[in-house]
């Protein structure tokens, strides 16, 4: 991806560009509205998407998302489009639309001075995104904040070969055309296609045609356009990207699938795109950002999962949603400083671990962008099979040791928390919603709860933690041959198992009484001399010994 190098390429009068690189994550600030989702499946769990939607809404300030440079109109539009895709958030979508409309002029147009040069112009991508926002909010894209966005956008569509149908930013430097100020790319082109097709504008057809020229023979869409001369097709203009990010291709599928029914060429192109997306999915359900990122991330997995969901690729969409859910904050005691961020989604596991230790802090922008891109993909999250359950928990636990605790009934990918007393460990449900936690047993003797919890359910059982100790032992110092010895063991826990050995042979065993005592009476052997008695409690480190004489 193109690095951000100067204020001009970072922002325009406070507006983010169509793409950016945030903490190593390729982030598209252009998202789309999904059309009607496939019929709801009995196995889908609405709680996952609901939690992230609620977290995202909580981040709004006066209807807008805030970032490191203040109010972010483009990212706010992204949030509205994602919330519209999951449904049930009409009031918030309208609130965001109103807030963006009030400042739409400063969003789509820019006017600033940098290095003694005055730059002015209009972003075609921003104009297209604002038009889509107006449409999903039910507002008039022909009069949004006093601007005719559809008409303005249509005027930025090239009508001369070889770039017919390509959107072109209007960019000027000191009043002269500035060819270096054109940042149009496939995200903005896709937005433009969506906005113009929805409005029924005749420019929509050429915009789609040019976008389809950006699809490579392998099935993916490239992000950046070629120069404005020569062959404009992906395979004809330049060598294909060696490791293209899935984001661009997924974005096209998300945005245009609802227009494919009446356009066989578009439908065929989207089928090829979906097939390519499926081929890029890792075995664990995740996606990476191609050569622009290192390893799988929630941004790419979110967009790809969203695309798979709207395309009806049920199994692949579920796998992506499961991977995302494993990085979604449930808000349990295991989440440390993330506990107050229930519903947020981490970019990757390293980001999650850092959040547990330090909170989201300066990475808040990354968390917000991830939530926006991943939110609709969670519509495919599979539900738990049955209620939350704990496996067998013994009555006594050996203090200071590691203990395996089995948990079932989580949703696939759902995060939970297992604790024994104050000791906790985070867990994630596997494909069957099961997990075995390895957790340290507290070091002190006491009655403790063994507990498993998820965001809306908790199951617990009581157990006694027993620490090592020297058990007090009292016995008769002298016993005549064949007469009875009486051994009293104290300091036990009610019900604790006790074994008494005399000269290595078990002579008594049983359970401690309610008063913590165990009494053993047995007949001693005839052989005279010193005899050693060893008593052991529930575990090997709870023991003592004493001796007596047979005479």
Image: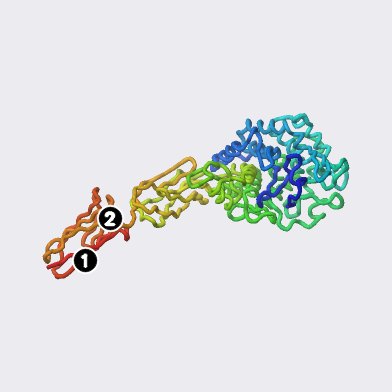
Which image quarter holds the C terminus? bottom left
Identified at 71% across, 47% down, the residue is 20
What x and y, as percent, mark residue 535? 25, 60
Task: Give me the disc on residue 532.
Answer: 1
Who is closer to the viewer here, 325 or 162? Answer: 325
| Mark 1: secondary structure | strand
From this viewpoint, is residue 525 visible? yes
| Mark 2: secondary structure | strand
Mark 1 or 2, closer to the camera:
1
What x and y, as percent, mark residue 162? 86, 48
Q: Judge whether 547 appears above or below 226 on screen.
A: below
The residue that mark 2 highlights is: 497
- Residue 198 sits in quarter: top right
Q: CA distance from mark 1 to mark 2?
A: 20 Å
The answer to the question of whether label 1 and label 2 lie on touching residues, with beta carbons closer than 8 A, is no
Who is closer to the viewer here, 316 or 444? Answer: 444
**Lateral position of residue 19 relative to residue 445, left or right:** right
Q: Residues within 10 Å of mark 1 (few under 14, many from 20)?
A: few
What x and y, as percent, mark residue 66? 66, 39
**Lateral position of residue 162 relative to residue 208, left or right:** right
Task: Give me the disc on residue 445.
Answer: none
Identified at 69% across, 41% down, the residue is 69
Q: Judge whether 478 appears above or below 9 on screen.
A: below
């Amino acid at each position: 991806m193109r690095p951000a190098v100067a204020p001009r390429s970072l922002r325009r009068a406070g507006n983010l560009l169509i793409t950016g690189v945030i903490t190593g994550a390729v982030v598209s600030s252009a998202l789309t509205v999904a059309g009607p989702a496939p019929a709801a499946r009995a196995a889908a769990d609405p709680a996952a998407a609901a939690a992230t939607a609620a977290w995202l809404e909580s981040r709004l300030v006066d209807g807008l998302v805030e970032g490191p440079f203040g109010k972010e109109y483009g990212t706010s539009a992204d949030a509205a489009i994602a919330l519209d895709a999951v449904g049930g958030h009409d009031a918030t979508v309208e609130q965001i639309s109103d807030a963006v409309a009030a400042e739409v002029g400063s969003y789509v147009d820019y006017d600033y001075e940098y290095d003694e040069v005055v730059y002015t112009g209009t972003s075609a991508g921003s104009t297209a995104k604002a038009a889509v926002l107006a449409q999903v909010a039910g507002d008039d894209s022909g009069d949004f904040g006093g601007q005719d966005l559809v008409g303005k956008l249509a005027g930025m569509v090239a009508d001369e070969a070889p770039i017919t149908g390509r959107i072109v930013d209007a960019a000027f430097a000191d009043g002269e055309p500035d060819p270096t100020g054109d940042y149009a790319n496939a995200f903005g082109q896709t937005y433009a296609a969506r906005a113009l097709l929805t409005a029924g504008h005749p420019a929509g057809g050429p915009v789609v045609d040019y976008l389809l020229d950006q699809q490579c023979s392998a099935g993916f869409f490239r992000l950046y356009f070629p120069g404005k001369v020569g062959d404009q097709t992906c395979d004809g203009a330049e060598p294909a990207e060696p490791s293209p990010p899935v984001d661009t291709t997924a974005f096209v599928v998300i945005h245009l699938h609802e227009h494919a029914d009446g356009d066989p060429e578009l439908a065929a192109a989207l089928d090829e795109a979906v097939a390519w997306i499926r081929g890029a999915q890792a075995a664990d359900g995740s996606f990476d950002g191609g050569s622009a990122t290192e390893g799988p991330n929630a941004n790419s997995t979110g967009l790809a999962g969203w695309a798979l969901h709207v395309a009806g690729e049920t199994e692949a969409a579920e796998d992506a949603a499961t991977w995302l859910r494993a990085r979604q904050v449930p808000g349990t005691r295991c989440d440390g400083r993330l506990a107050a961020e229930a519903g947020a989604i981490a970019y990757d596991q390293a980001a999650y671990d850092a959040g547990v230790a330090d909170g989201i802090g300066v990475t808040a922008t990354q968390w917000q962008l991830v939530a926006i891109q991943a939110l609709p993909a969670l519509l495919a999250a599979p539900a738990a099979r049955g209620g939350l359950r704990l496996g067998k928990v013994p009555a006594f636990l050996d203090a200071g040791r590691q203990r395996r605790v089995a948990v079932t009934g989580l949703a696939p990918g759902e995060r939970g928390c297992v604790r024994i007393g104050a000791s906790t460990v985070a867990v994630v449900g596997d494909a069957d919603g099961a997990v075995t936690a390895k957790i340290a047993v507290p070091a002190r003797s006491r009655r403790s709860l063994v507990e498993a919890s998820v965001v809306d359910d908790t199951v617990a059982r009581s157990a006694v933690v027993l620490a090592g100790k020297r058990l007090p032992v009292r016995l008769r110092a002298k016993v005549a041959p064949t007469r009875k010895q009486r051994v009293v063991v104290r300091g036990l826990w009610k019900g604790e198992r006790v074994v008494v050995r005399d000269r290595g042979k078990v002579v008594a065993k049983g359970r401690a009484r309610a008063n913590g005592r165990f009494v053993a009476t047995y007949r001693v052997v005839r052989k005279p001399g010193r005899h050693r008695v060893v008593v052991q409690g529930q575990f090997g480190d709870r023991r003592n010994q004493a001796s007596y004489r047979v005479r």
